Amino acid sequence: MSIQKINAGIIGATGMVGHRFITLLAEHPYFNISVLAASPRSAGKTFTEAVGERWKLSVPMPELVKDMIVYDASDVEKVSGMCDFVFCAVEMPGGKKEIKELEEAYARTETPVISNNSACRNFPDVPMLIPEINGSHINVIETQRKRLGTKTGFVAVKPNCSIQSYVPMLTPLLKYGIKEVVVSTYQAISGSGKTFKEWPEMIDNVIPYIGGEEEKSEKEPLKIWGNINNGLIENAQSPVITSQCIRIPVTDGHLATVFVNFEDKNNKPSKEEIIKLWKEYKGEPGFIDLPSAPKQFIYYFEDDSRPQTGLDRDLENGMAISAGRLREDPAGLFDYKFIGLSHNTLRGAAGGGVLSAELLYRKGYIVKK
């Protein structure tokens, strides 16, 4: 397949997820970084000047962005005129309302938006993508374009980073009728956009609350598992999910402890069947060979000491999901329990956004202007 590179803008380029987007796109086979944008205080500076010593990743800043001028993200006409589509990971003082307005403003300039933000996630005509699981949800984009009055512009989002540590493992089990799920997520500090240098209070500390995370953990999977009806996504009605989300002192990687009950205990899968389903589950990106798609989506570890955050978060360039400790509940309160792990700023944030953009590009939704 002959690839014509598409110009990508990064809105929120000076934050941690923006940094991840930059490293992932620096040598991407489909996309070229053509413009960087951020808050007004960074506008007019080179990227190096805007970031200073706040480069948040262990890998070096790519040379190609060091001298690029950072533009004001609110200058929609200017920024959209310099790219074919944008990745958005911006924080704004007006919160979700202001971010929604900004993303839809870009879409109305016929510039597709791949968003890491939560502002548009609950709209039934906005696909919220884990491409291996619900790539078909991109079909609602036509409905969204009618609402926005666009021909090529739209907003597509990725889900909350925490749910990707357990939703992939639950998905192939849905056919057995999952009744209820209890999940606790143990989330890295990079999920807040910070490093230990910036947040020394997190060293040797655990914070038992992350604002908004539990609601997202309980509701967003139901949209992921929803069906399209009359051009809109209808959320699934089950299973019931309850969660707790905790901040822990690790740099990257969200780990989940998961407890599952099935509707019919006489028809639940065996442990061997579940592991086989996990190992064989691929989803569409695996079949159409997208550059960021992991060759193996879910890894299962037989060793009870795995997955470990430090050892396993980077599997398949941080795009694979790890599972372990699948066992029946000896107390009989649940049918099974297991551990899940995902890299929150790669699979859960920028990497998931890039994979979604690759899928949308291959399906003809992202094109040269």
Image (cartoon, rainbow, N blue to C red):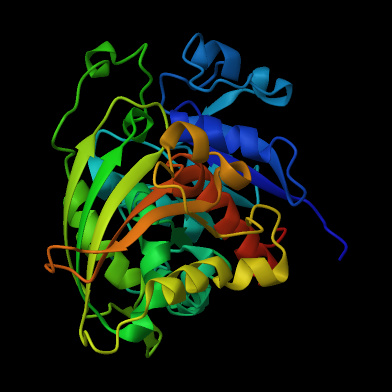
Q: Is residue 221 above or below residue 77?
A: below
| Residue 62 x, y percent position in the rendering | 68, 24
Residue 142 horizontal side relative to residue 271, left or right: right
| Residue 359 x, y percent position in the rendering | 62, 64
Which residue sits at x=51%, y=40%? Answer: 312
Q: Is residue 32 above or below residue 190?
A: below
Q: Is residue 155 above or below residue 178?
A: above
Q: Can you name the residue that lies furthest to the front here?
A: 330
Quadrant housing the N terminus: bottom right
Residue 282 horizontal side relative to residue 172, left or right: right
Q: Nearer the viewer, residue 308 or 35?
A: 308
* Quadrant of the image occupied by residue 306: top left
Residue 38 can be seen, yes or no: yes
| Residue 96 x, y percent position in the rendering | 26, 47
Quadrant housing the C terminus: bottom right
Which residue sits at x=30%, y=24%? Answer: 249
* Quadrant of the image occupied by residue 325: bottom left
| Residue 81 x, y percent position in the rendering | 62, 45
Disc count in the image?
Answer: 0
Which residue sits at x=47%, y=35%? Answer: 17
Q: Nearer the viewer, residue 347 or 272?
A: 272
Residue 123 can be seen, yes or no: no
Q: Can you name the residue that lies furthest to the right here?
A: 2
Which residue sits at x=41%, y=19%? Answer: 41
Q: Nearer the viewer, residue 166 or 22?
A: 166
Q: Is residue 327 above or below residue 257?
A: below
